[in-house]
Amino acid sequence: MYDKQILTCFLERQGQLFREPVAQTPEEAEEFLEDCMAVVCANIKEVRAYFKDEGADITGMSDAELADAQEVFAVPDGRFLIVEA
């Protein structure tokens, strides 16, 4: 479900959400993301729709602020990974 770019992004940047690493390998990262039911969004518009669907109050947040949210990981190819742990 999670490709190499997603797993690499999470492994490299997991410190933005967790004080200590929760995964050391791509396999551990995939298992963790599956357990958390992490979501991959194609673009920031989908990120906004996801949070609205979840009932999060994102009124007034710019796309940049949304992309900088602690649980949002920007993937180098333009996608976003949302991890709600």
Image (cartoon, rainbow, N blue to C red):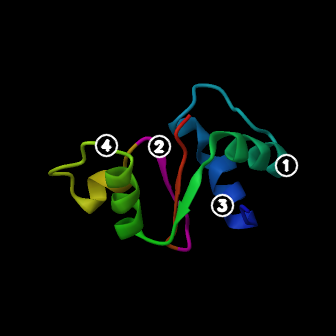
Q: Where residue 56 sits in the image (x, y, percent)?
A: 31, 43
The residue type indicated by label 1 comes to Glu
Label located before the other in sequence (2 or 4): 4
Q: Is residue 47 magenta?
A: no
Distance of mark 2 from mark 4, alpha carbons? 13 Å
Label located before the other in sequence (3 or 1): 3
Q: Which residues are magenta?
A: 70-77
84 or 24: nearer the eye?
Answer: 84
**Position of residue 47 in the picture relative to residue 19 (left or right):** left
Distance of mark 3 from mark 1, alpha carbons? 12 Å
Density class for disc 1 (Cα within 10 Å; few <14, some 14-19, many ≥20) is few
Label located before the other in sequence (3 or 4): 3
**Position of residue 66 in the picture relative to residue 61 (left or right):** right
Label located before the other in sequence (2 or 1): 1
Q: Where residue 73 sits in the image (x, y, percent)?
A: 51, 53
Q: Which residue is mark 1?
A: 27
